[in-house]
């Protein structure tokens, strides 16, 4: 996707020119006055204020002002070259003009030059040079550069992960009213990353970002009021913020609203409205919503379900409810800056495990179903991965990498598993936050059925986090008896029971995985059940050698 830098002008001189006619402005520009040339270029670019839009004329007048050393004009001419507006697209020329403005301490140009070095456009890719220019722009209070630095340090993007530095830059941008930074700072206070954990501060920053329409902040604020963390517990206020997020396509908020209306928590009890939100959440891909919706149907009349469907049909016409989530109310330039800073970073990360010596891998389907490109990290090597088959109903995907003589895990039937059996998993949760070392967690089989008595799943007490999906559920013999697929929504259960659940998670039973694999005879023939390991220590060691990181790119 081509990164587009929209021209954002300084109108300090425009105000002075408001009483000047176009003819007078043109005369001054032609006589060599750089400020008049800049204003005239801006008018041609905008296509307003009495002059038709003409990028060629805009570029001509920007150049005249730029050649006289006007930083505004140099920066804007660089943008014209970057986007190919009025001039041939030329990244080298863009860098040339950005540099001229940047060395005059023009913050916007410093930020743009940083982006050019970051992406290697018009110059050799140089992250140190990029950060140098971002810091120069940020030090002058340029909010986008401050946010970019915060993002880079918080995620460890091309710099060592440093929460203190991230919090510093997010704070600078947040205090200037930048919603994305306000949300990010709220998260840091929520988790105690780079700042002391402080739910009051988290709620404050979530509120500021949510008021500007930031969808994730709206959702987090709903969670905050549901739990009473940093604010008095108030389900009515929580419902308000969940509704705002749900209207912008946040599926988790839609699901929670379904629960709130079914229980009358924070809203009037209304099965029709509950069914509507569950149906919307289901249409947006929430796997649990369908089960709750079907359970609710038994309590409703046919007229009520028809009314709920009509409400959904009306909302289909409203942008946001079923479309891809709206981006917060930032300018197009803001959106593109953030997108390009994380360009090349995976949209998702998950866990998988080898099941054959020649590179077949199992993982959860939901972890890869929307990815257009998948890579696997294993034993300090990076592989391009091919999706061999995936099944959304069982939530299983089979991937393939090209290699041989790889260690792999045996898969056995889960029919003999009993409640209380000891199990463990090894995976890669939140690799951007917790690092790339595999994490071991253990627990037991809590139930032989999953959410809403789903016979395909085990309920397990193993703590899991985002990134664990697709990992193996292993018994003490080192045999795979399931695949980690989901965790219970803490906020949802809080609304139903009044308490937060502890370690309620689910794994797809291996018997269903084996049935799925029977549809691939060539693979089924390769599945070997080697001898069980001697003890638990050996089982853990073997599992650790057979898991992989799944990276999905949109």
Image (spheres, helix red, strand yellow):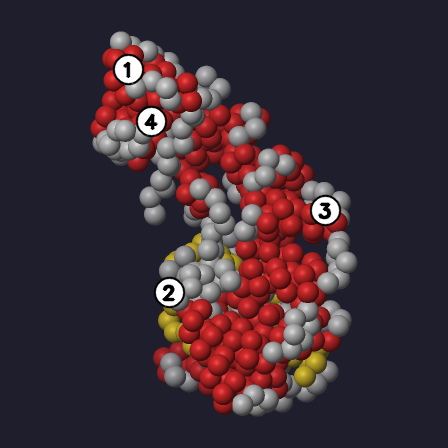
Local secondary structure at mark 2: strand
Local secondary structure at mark 3: helix
Q: Residue at x 54, y 90 (%)?
A: 301
Q: Nearer the viewer, mark 3 or mark 4?
A: 4
Q: Residue 232 at what x, y percent from top left?
A: 77, 58
Q: Nearer the viewer, mark 2 or mark 4?
A: 4
Relative depth, front residue between 12 and 282: 12
Q: Nearer the viewer, mark 3 or mark 2?
A: 3
Disc 3 residue crowd, few under 14, some 14–19, many 20+, Cα 10 Å: some
The numbered mark, 1 or 4, whose residue comes first in the sequence reads: 1
Relative depth, front residue between 537 and 368: 368
Q: Does residue 312 appear left or right of residue 471 in this picture?
A: left
Q: Residue 263 at what x, y percent from top left?
A: 67, 77
Residue 542 in view (yes/no) = no
Q: Residue at x 58, y 43 (%)?
A: 181
Q: Is residue 29 above or below residue 189?
A: above
The numbered mark, 3 or 1, whose residue comes first in the sequence reads: 1
Name the residue at the top extreme.
Answer: 31
Disc 3 to disc 4, C-alpha distance? 42 Å
Tell me if label 2 and label 1 are in contact, CB under 8 Å.
Answer: no
Q: Which residue is mark 1?
A: 24
The numbered mark, 2 or 4, whose residue comes first in the sequence reads: 4
What's the mark number on residue 42?
A: 4
Q: Which residue is mark 2?
A: 386
Disc 2 to disc 1, C-alpha distance? 65 Å
Disc 1 to disc 4, C-alpha distance? 16 Å
Tell me if label 3 and label 2 are in contact, CB under 8 Å.
Answer: no
Disc 2 to disc 4, C-alpha distance? 49 Å
Local secondary structure at mark 1: helix
Q: Does residue 461 appear left or right of residue 15 in this picture?
A: right
Q: Which residue is mark 3?
A: 201
The numbered mark, 3 or 2, whose residue comes first in the sequence reads: 3
């Amino acid at each position: 996707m081509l990164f587009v830098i929209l021209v954002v002008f300084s109108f300090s001189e425009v105000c002075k020119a408001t009483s000047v006619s176009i003819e007078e402005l043109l005369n001054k520009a032609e006589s060599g006055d750089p400020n008049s040339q800049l204003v005239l270029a801006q008018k041609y670019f905008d296509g307003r204020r009495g002059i038709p839009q003409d990028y060629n004329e805009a570029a001509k007048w920007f150049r005249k002002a730029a050649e006289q050393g006007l930083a505004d004009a140099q920066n804007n001419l660089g943008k014209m070259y970057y986007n190919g507006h009025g001039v041939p697209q030329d990244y080298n020329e863009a860098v040339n003009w950005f540099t001229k403005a940047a060395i005059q301490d023009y913050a916007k140009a410093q930020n743009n030059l940083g982006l050019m070095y970051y992406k290697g456009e018009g110059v050799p890719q140089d992250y140190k040079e990029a950060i140098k220019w971002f810091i120069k722009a940020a030090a002058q209070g340029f909010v986008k550069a401050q946010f970019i630095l915060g993002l880079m340090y918080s995620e460890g993007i091309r710099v060592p992960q440093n929460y203190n530095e991230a919090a510093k830059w997010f704070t600078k941008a947040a205090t200037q009213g930048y919603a994305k930074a306000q949300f990010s700072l709220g998260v840091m206070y929520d988790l105690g990353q780079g700042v002391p954990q402080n739910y009051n501060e988290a709620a404050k920053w979530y509120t500021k970002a949510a008021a500007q329409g930031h969808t994730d902040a709206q959702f987090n604020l709903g969670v905050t009021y549901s739990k009473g963390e940093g604010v008095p517990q108030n389900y009515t206020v929580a419902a308000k913020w969940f509704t705002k997020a749900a209207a912008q396509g946040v599926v988790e908020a839609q699901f929670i609203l379904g629960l709130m209306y079914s229980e009358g928590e924070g809203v009037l009890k209304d099965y029709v409205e509950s069914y509507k939100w569950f149906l919307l959440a289901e249409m947006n891909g929430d796997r649990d919503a369908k089960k709750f919706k079907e359970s609710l149907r038994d309590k409703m009349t046919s007229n009520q379900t028809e009314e709920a469907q009509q409400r959904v049909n009306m909302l289909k016409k409203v942008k946001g409810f079923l479309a891809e989530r709206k981006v917060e109310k930032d300018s197009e330039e803001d959106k593109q800056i953030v997108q390009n800073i994380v360009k090349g970073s995976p949209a998702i990360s998950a866990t998988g495990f080898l099941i054959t010596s020649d590179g077949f891998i199992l993982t959860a389907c939901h972890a890869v179903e929307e990815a257009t490109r998948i890579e696997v990290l294993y034993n300090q090597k990076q592989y391009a991965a091919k999706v061999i088959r995936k099944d959304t109903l069982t939530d299983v995907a089979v991937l393939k990498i090209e290699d041989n003589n790889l260690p792999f895990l045996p898969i056995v039937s889960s029919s003999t598993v009993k409640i209380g059996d000891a199990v463990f998993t090894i995976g890669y949760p939140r690799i951007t936050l917790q690092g790339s070392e595999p994490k071991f967690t253990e627990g037991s089989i809590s139930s032989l059925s999953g959410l809403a008595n789903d016979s395909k799943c085990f309920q397990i007490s193993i703590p899991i986090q985002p990134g664990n999906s697709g990992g193996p559920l292993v018994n003490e013999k080192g045999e795979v008896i399931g695949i980690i697929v989901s965790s219970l929504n803490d906020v949802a259960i809080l609304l139903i029971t009044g308490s937060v659940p502890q370690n309620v998670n689910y794994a797809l039973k291996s018997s269903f995985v084996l049935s799925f694999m029977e549809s691939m005879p060539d693979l089924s023939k390769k599945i070997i059940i080697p001898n069980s390991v001697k003890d638990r220590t050996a089982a853990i060691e073997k599992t650790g050698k057979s898991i992989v990181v799944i990276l999905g790119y949109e």
